[in-house]
Amino acid sequence: MAAVSSASDSGDHRGRHPPERRLLILGGPQSGKTSTANTILGDKVFDAGTETTHSNVGQTEIYGRRVTVVDTPPWAIPSDPDDDTDGENNDSAGAESDSPPRPPPSLDSEGPCMGAILCPPGPHAILLVVSVTQPFTDTQRRAAEDQLGALGGGTWRYSMVLFTGVDKLPKGVFIEEHIANTGDALQWLVERCGSR
């Protein structure tokens, strides 16, 4: 399993290579992970028009520092009967069905560990990308917790929430107000990341 490295463990690279920073980008479907990765890299390195199916690596140099960005597949969001965010009408609850119940999707078989392996010895920071235009449910909170749990202990210390779509918030609404009014799941995520 790949480890998350601290900023201080990269050693003294003066004279050999420019200082390096490695970023691992995680998030749910349609969160804006790939666009975020492209923005950080300053170029359209990854195809934002299609869903990411495998972890991909992009590199650039910013102010003399090599920056490695790993764009990962979205975390799987299992269906949860308590989260009514899919818009389906559940009037037939309890009625018999001809089709067997669908099992919840598992976490991507590649998982976040593959992304961490692609930026050895591990990421300096983990960016959890959350779109303000989509509800962040308790099911998504559990998916985020599973993803970071797969990377091992201590990963929350190197994690931060990066919000996309902030320009779509109503005029005069700041991100802090959005977090406070969205619900416990998003507040938990931000607090778990040390309010970063």
Image (cartoon, rainbow, N blue to C red):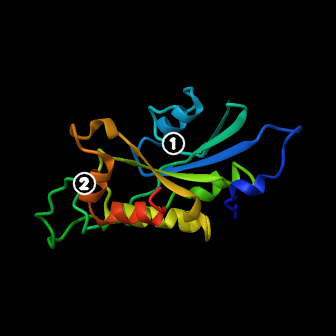
Quarter of the N terminus within the rendering = bottom right
**Point 35% across, 63% down: residue:** 187
Q: Residue reaching furthest left?
A: 91
Numbered disc 2: secondary structure: loop
Q: Residue reaching furthest bottom?
A: 94
Q: Is residue 168 above or below residue 143?
A: above
**Point 82% across, 52% down: residue:** 11
Neighbour class for label 1 at 10 Å: few (<14), some, many (≥20)? some
Q: Quadrant of residue 41?
A: top right
Is the Cβ of the residue at disc 2 closer than 8 Å to that at disc 1?
Answer: no
Q: Is residue 43 above or below residue 190?
A: above
> Which amino acid type is marked by label 2?
Asp
Q: Position of residue 116 (x, y in %)?
A: 65, 54
* Disc with the residue nearer the chain's start (2 vs 1): 1
Numbered disc 1: secondary structure: loop
Q: Position of residue 82 (x, y in %)?
A: 24, 69
**Point 15% across, 73% down: residue:** 94
Neighbour class for label 2 at 10 Å: few (<14), some, many (≥20)? few
Q: Which mark is residue 52?
A: 1
Q: Position of residue 89 (x, y in %)?
A: 14, 57
**Left or right placement of residue 180 versus residue 123 in this view:** left
User: On the image, numbered disc 2 is attached to which residue?
Assistant: 86
Q: Quadrant of residue 190?
A: bottom left
Can residue 14 be seen? yes
